[in-house]
Amino acid sequence: MYWLCAAVLCCLPSPRTGLPSSTGNPCTKEHGIVLPSLAIEVWERVLDHLWYDQETLKACTLVCRAWYPRARFHLLRTVILRERHHVYRLAKLVQKDKDMVMGAFYAHAVRGVILQGGSTPEVRIPVPHLATFATALAGKLLALDEVALCNAEWISDSSFVNTSLHLSTFHSVTRLVLQAVTFPNIHTFRRLICAFPRLGYLECWGVKFTNPGIAEAAPRYPWIHSSLSRLYLNTTSMGTITDLLLATGIASRLHTIILGYWEFIPIQHAHILGIQRLLDSAEDNLRSLDAAFTCPQSPVGKGTGVSEYLGPPLTLARCTNLVALVVRTEPIDSADYGWIYHLLASISSTSLRQMTIVIKLSVKLKQSLVSVRPMFQTMLVETLDELLATEQFAGVECVEFKLRVYKAFDKIPSVGLWEKIVLGGFPRSRRRILCEFISHPLTIVLVAHAQFH
């Protein structure tokens, strides 16, 4: 990586001539730095490792002609289209490339397209360039895998019939992400996701409907997808979307469900939002479940958990082939964690191999490990320790306890302290817990792996 940075610094365009200081082999003695004479294939491999770094890739396109195609290829991996002229520029580039000896180089480079309306999720504006994108690039982006629609408001679907016909030519698209999008009704939403014939993953967060309508009317429009099997939903309009998936039968084919994650769902609203019906419909097809819930407050103010949980608990009794389960929650004062016990106790799958419990500390509430201690000092953890030691969980290879904290915290907890808290709650597994430190760009995750065999 050092040689790449040195090459970028040495070979940037000269302020006097405007030309790169090295136009052939990236090897120069300028500025007192000597770069090795390497085959272009070696440099291309280095560029491949920078596929995610947009700024560095832009600099690399200015180094020399030999670097330009590879760096440009990765820059086009994900394209953001904010206006119609952006679509036309991309279409011109792809069309021009087809006439070159290189063949459909850039046509295979674009893997993701983001069609953006407003600058933030709070600013949702129409996206007329969606129709332009569908028309101008139909059948041209041969490797396009993901389409995202962000910060957008759908005013009317009167002209969407022609647009959906063009979108149906994007046979390589398997992922659709809808982020902060307002639809006029549920049927416009259905028409959009039905437009992609090979859609396998649907992600919705911040999706709203001006007129939700009645999802039961959806069977009049037959669901054409047999491949949609992975679903991500957050709380906004979750009930409306769930009703549609149940009415069309797609819910019965889901094998991966992610609920919440960034925006936690109040556990007391789970049944109102149709989550139990969604899980029951997936039945034995469901292999992986990742659900994020906020805890209700204990009626007695102590959060001792198991017998105090109010309302019908979620159950996984009908998910008989579940392999992986992730449960996310946030610690609050006097929380009732009983729903976690009821959820785990309802598991009937003999295929379950991994369970993960993630506890996220809030920056806004200025939480610390002090907020987590009550959870591991209540009857809940003691009963979980007994539950996980039964034959019901004989196939579980490990249970992970993750503590997620943002780097914005003034003081990051130590792995040793997190390990001490977990060990104190699970005495039967005290000798089989392994703690790790995992760092992410925005968060730090402390992990305790508890082996129950």
Image (spheres, helix red, strand yellow):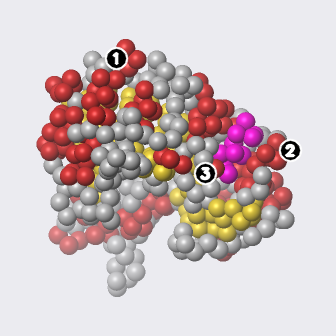
Instruction: Give residue 300's mark.
Output: none
In the image, residue 151 sits, relative to residue 243, either above or below, namely below
Q: Main secondary structure of the magenta part?
A: helix
Q: Quadrant of residue 354?
A: top left
In the image, residue 240 sits, relative to residue 183, either above or below, namely above
Label 1: which secondary element: loop
Q: Earlier in the sequence, mark 1 or mark 2?
A: 2
Q: Identify the amino acid type marked 3.
A: Met
List the residue tagged with mark 1.
390
In the image, residue 147 sits, relative to residue 287, either above or below, namely below
- CA gap between label 1 and label 2 equals 48 Å
Which class describes the residues within 10 Å of circle 2: few (<14), some (14-19), or many (20+)? few
- CA gap between label 2 and label 3 equals 21 Å
Q: Identify the amino acid type marked 2.
A: Arg
- CA gap between label 1 and label 3 equals 35 Å
Q: Which residues are magenta?
A: 240-249
List the residue tagged with mark 3.
238
Q: Earlier in the sequence, mark 2 or mark 3?
A: 2
Which class describes the residues within 10 Å of circle 3: few (<14), some (14-19), or many (20+)? many
Locate residue 2, reporting x and y percent: 23, 58
Instruction: Give residue 220's mark.
Output: 2
Label 2: which secondary element: helix
